[in-house]
Amino acid sequence: MSADAPAPTSAAVSQVGTATVKRGMAEMLKGGVIMDVVDADQARIAEDAGAVAVMALERVPADIRRDGGVARMSDPDMIDRIQAAVSIPVMAKARIGHFVEAQVLQASGVDFVDESEVLTPADYTHHIDKRSFTVPFVCGATNLGEALRRISEGAAMIRSKGEAGTGDVSQATTHIRTILGEIRRLTVMDEPELFAAAKVMAAPIDLVRETAGLGRLPVVLFTAGGVATPADAAMMMQLGADGVFIGSGIFKSGDPASRARACVEATAYFTDAERIAKVSRGLGEAMVGIAADSLGAAELLAQRGW
Amino acid sequence: MTARPAAAGRAVGSDGWPVPRVGILALQGDVREHDRALRDAGAEPLAVRRVEDLHGLDGLVLPGGESTTMGRLLGVFDLLDPLRRLVQEGLPVYGSCAGMILLADEVRGGPSDQPRLGGLDITVRRNAFGRQVDSFETDLAFAGVGDVHAVFIRAPWVEAAGSDVRVLARVPDSARQAAGRVVAVRQGAVLATSFHPELTGDSRIHALFVDMIKEGAG
């Protein structure tokens, strides 16, 4: 190699954990599928299928829902085994408000922390102050005000919550439509209306103004909670999501490897109905699922978060 | 650079050259950011998802994202061979981060069977700087451009390069153990960076790529 690069500027300062580096990490995941996995074998299946990242957890949401009890951060040993098995980013969940679980996950070297309503909350008033971490965070939201509050706390990525562990896409649809619809309304507001909207949404005015100007969130917006088929994934993309989380939908189905590949392809080619039809064939049984409207109020995970 | 007459039906830029049509591989990744940087640099970006989208391009950008995902989708959607052919034929190509990995002839630190385009005589190491908590931003000197602000996200670096490969930038001394690592290279019409100029709002490296396209066309 010819060595004619200029001499490095030794005065330059290198910084880790900046907002650019954290939000930029989320930008690299766009157009992709992030899959829940509970062991190294599942992680390899997800990577081979083309997942952009895996979420390492001990039980998928459908099992958390079935088993009940308190759901907590995963065992660091289990996270280590998944990190060793794949080269794609590894995410892990911390309980809402549990900043020490988040510190442990950061120390374990996970690439993204999900402060998640799927686990039992550790604090019913406060979320984690995510600005003080080097690792980036993704948080759930059911509406724009909630999304902007999480961003003001330092979230580098938002996912609409849906209703995890159901296989019923209706709540994911409601939440992504709500967030994107609220953004569309902001884009036509004048300044006094933006102030009033910020008050109603309980969100900082500077983030409300920035969102109105961009016509989108200042961070990447994925969708989650009930996506179970390639058509579900493509529908979320057509509605305007930047990408998709699939939790129980893949490894609670009859043929996880085929379904994982099909969901990746449908997400990449989300406007091409012929391709979505092609990849939807021969996938075996989808997860059985629970209709979200059959759940009692106490069973709705999406209500966790404040 | 001398002006040349515009081809029929093509928009003409302020310098008298036809506006280059640059495809962006849009299977996954930070396509929107490259789109904006290319517009700022005076090119017309076009999303590439199908073989038909490759027709009539003056250049191609391989964006940042997950190289394993993009590699798999290139295979599934029959883009691997057509793209390899275009790179071999000398179509100007620029890859950032995952794009650099797709262009490298040799890759270390990932699945060995990961589908790639190749065409750039380098060996890259994936996730060379560490995990996301080690991702960083810094200023570095870029040959022919000057000081640029560089954002590294789970980035690769260049471990070895052939004699035809020009080194354009290295990690500065302040970046701890990684100081001096090669992070930008050019070989003929192929440009690659470990970092993401598309995330900074500075379009000078994309302008360099647009100049490469015009050099080849002139």
Image: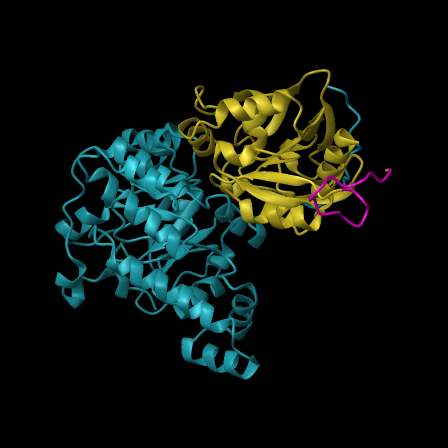
Chain colours: A cyan, B yellow
The image position of residue B119, as x and y in percent, is 61, 21
Along the line of sight, the residue nearer the viewer: A206 or B53: B53
Residue A210, percent across and down? 56, 67
* x and y percentages locating residue A17 in the rendered image: 55, 49
- Whether residue A219 can be seen here: yes
Of all residues shown, which one is farthest toward the right? B2
Q: Quadrant of the N terminus of chain B?
A: top right
Can you tell which quarter of the image residue A40 is in? top left
Q: Judge whether residue A55 can be spotted in this image.
A: no
Q: Main secondary structure of the magenta part?
A: loop
Magenta residue check for B12: yes
* Residue at image location 63% in from the left, 25% down from the top: B158
- Using the image, determine if residue A213 lies above or below residue A11: below
Q: Is residue A95 left or right of residue B162?
A: left
Q: Which of A85/B78 is in front?
A: B78
Q: Quadrant of residue B45?
A: top right
Q: Which residues are magenta?
A: B2-17
Residue in view at x 28 percent, y 29 percent: A41
Say whether residue A297 is left or right of residue A221: left
Quarter of the image that includes the C terminus of chain B: top right
Q: Residue at x 80, y 26 (%)?
A: A4
Residue A193 position, x and y percent, is 51, 82
